[in-house]
């Protein structure tokens, strides 16, 4: 009798899995990594080779891999109450909402739980539209102003807010009412490249667009305090303060999308803290559980929430999520935040981020046009020459592969703006040690040497 040979992980995968954002034609020649286990900042493939995960999965494993505390909290919750919907109440949901409110500035205290960053953004957009109509009777505030290069998610509303042509064009037409302005990009600024310094003209664009459209038609501005997937652009000094002031002047809500930047990534617990402002609505995901289980949240101020109180049902926020605020995810979130705050990981993020960015600048590679770092969220803008021409995408892909062969996993801003898929991205776990930061630099140096 012939022996039955079980198919390998690779065969099963290539035959059946539809991978996000991957061209499947020819995938067997460049198969995805087969990661089978992980510990700390390191992941291991099916052949036993280890890689330093300088992307923390997808910008999300903030406390690092292998935390037993989270595993045990989830297992205990599974036994106690594996599921109940948040149309009613359960202990980890209430406790995590309260814990988040404690970590946030006063008044930013009403938490709507979801499963993914896209859902959190979708929810924020819906809240903003309904709020606009309730808080400004007789007006029709439905427009949302976002920024080019921003990424806000894959669902139709979040994708409409996204400012990346390549991610959108196959699915157009998208949701009406979304407008975009230029992001802050001092390296290639369209506004102040001839000025001695940043004039915040890009922030003032929000004011211009709101006035041109008519403030009575605008519900909200949405922005990532640091653009992540679009190529890592940090808000310059004064930028968020200026946008906050513009929003206040026009009665427009400010939505901060901190799906990547939340929970220590940029060296503060939340990135808006760098500017000392408070958004009206905040979206978080990823680092809320360090991705041990799916969870996201849309968090509103008391003022926004209060607009949804009313005698009639049409005042309420009519949205239900079966899995949003799953008790096991909330238990993971509570254990994760306990680790994050006990170990003050945002401080290590600030410290190691500065060290890593400095060491990358010291490489003095002509292919690195700029190193953009804030905490452990770092972008390397790759260039072809001293005139800042972007390094062609095939070369960027090749460097990324060479760095991987050297044992370090870095990201890349693929499918964003035509011609500008030239930023390598770093977002390692916030537990990163100095030796591990050195290992990232060594991997990048080795990759660049072979370019
Ligand atoms: C800023 C931002 N918003 C929203 C999302 C969407 O999150 P998710 O992939 O969990 O749907 C992402 C994903 O990377 C993101 O970076």
Image: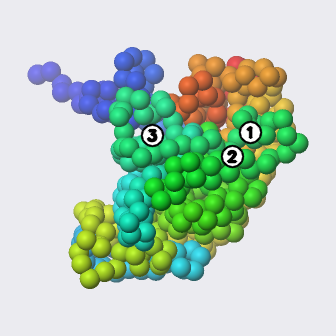
Real-space CA distance between mark 3 and mark 2, rounded to the nearest whole angstrom: 41 Å
Residue 81, image x, y percentages: 26, 75
Looking at the figure, which quarter contains the C terminus? top right
- Residue 202 disc label: 2
Q: Nearer the viewer, mark 1 or mark 3?
A: 1
Drawn side of residue 375 relative to residue 318, left or right:
right
- Residue 35 disc label: 3
Residue 431, image x, y percentages: 64, 58
Q: Determine crowd level at label 2: few under 14, some 14-19, many 20+ residues with C-alpha closer than 10 A.
A: many
- Residue 51 disc label: none
Give the residue drawn at x 32%, y 27%: 14
Q: Is residue 85 above or below residue 193?
A: below
Real-space CA distance between mark 2 and mark 1, rounded to the nearest whole angstrom: 7 Å
Cβ atoms under marks 3 and 2 closer than 8 Å:
no
Drawn side of residue 70 relative to residue 172, left or right:
right
Asked whether the viewer can see residue 66, the reply is: no
- Residue 191 disc label: 1
Near-viewer residue (348 or 392): 392
Q: Which structural element holds mark 1? A: loop
Sequence-first tag of 2 and 1: 1
Real-space CA distance between mark 1 and mark 3, rounded to the nearest whole angstrom: 44 Å
Q: Determine crowd level at label 3: few under 14, some 14-19, many 20+ residues with C-alpha closer than 10 A.
A: some
């Amino acid at each position: 009798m012939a022996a039955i040979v079980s198919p390998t992980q690779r065969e099963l995968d290539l035959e059946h899995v539809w991978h996000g954002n991957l061209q499947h034609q020819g995938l067997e020649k460049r198969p995805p990594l087969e990661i089978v286990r992980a510990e700390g900042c390191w992941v291991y493939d099916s052949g036993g080779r280890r890689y330093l995960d300088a992307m923390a999965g997808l910008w999300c494993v903030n406390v690092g891999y292998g935390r037993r505390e989270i595993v045990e909290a989830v297992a205990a919750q599974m036994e106690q109450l594996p599921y109940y919907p948040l149309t009613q109440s359960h202990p980890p949901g209430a406790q995590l909402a309260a814990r988040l409110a404690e970590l946030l500035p006063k008044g930013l205290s009403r938490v709507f739980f979801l499963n993914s960053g896209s859902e959190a953004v979708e929810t924020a957009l819906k809240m903003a539209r309904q709020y606009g109509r309730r808080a400004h009777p007789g007006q029709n505030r439905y427009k949302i102003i976002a920024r080019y290069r921003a990424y806000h998610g894959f669902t139709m509303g979040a994708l409409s807010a996204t400012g990346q042509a390549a991610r959108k064009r196959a699915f157009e037409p998208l949701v009406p009412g979304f407008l975009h302005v230029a992001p802050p990009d001092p390296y290639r600024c369209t506004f102040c490249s001839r000025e001695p310094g940043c004039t915040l003209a890009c922030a003032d664009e929000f004011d211009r667009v709101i006035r041109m459209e008519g403030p009575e038609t605008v519900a909200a501005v949405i922005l990532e305090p640091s653009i992540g997937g679009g190529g890592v652009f940090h808000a310059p000094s004064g930028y968020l303060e200026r946008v906050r002031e513009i929003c206040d002047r026009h009665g427009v809500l400010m939505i901060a999308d901190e799906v990547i930047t939340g929970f220590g990534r940029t060296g503060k617990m939340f990135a808006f803290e760098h500017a000392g402002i408070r958004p009206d609505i905040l979206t978080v995901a990823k680092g809320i559980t360090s991705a041990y289980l799916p969870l996201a949240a849309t968090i509103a101020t008391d003022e926004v929430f209060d607009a949804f109180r009313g005698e009639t049902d049409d005042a309420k926020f009519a949205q239900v999520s079966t899995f949003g605020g799953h008790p096991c995810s909330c238990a993971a979130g509570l254990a994760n935040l306990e680790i994050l705050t006990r170990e003050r990981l945002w401080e290590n993020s600030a410290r190691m981020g500065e060290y890593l960015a400095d060491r990358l600048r010291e490489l003095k590679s002509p292919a690195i046009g700029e190193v953009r770092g804030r905490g452990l969220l770092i972008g390397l803008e790759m260039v072809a020459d001293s005139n800042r021409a972007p390094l062609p995408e095939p070369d960027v892909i090749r460097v990324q592969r060479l760095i991987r062969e050297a044992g370090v996993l870095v990201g890349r801003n693929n499918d964003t703006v035509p011609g500008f898929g030239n930023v390598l991205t770093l977002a390692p776990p916030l537990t990163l040690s100095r030796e591990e930061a050195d290992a990232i630099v060594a991997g990048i140096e080795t990759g660049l040497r072979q370019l």
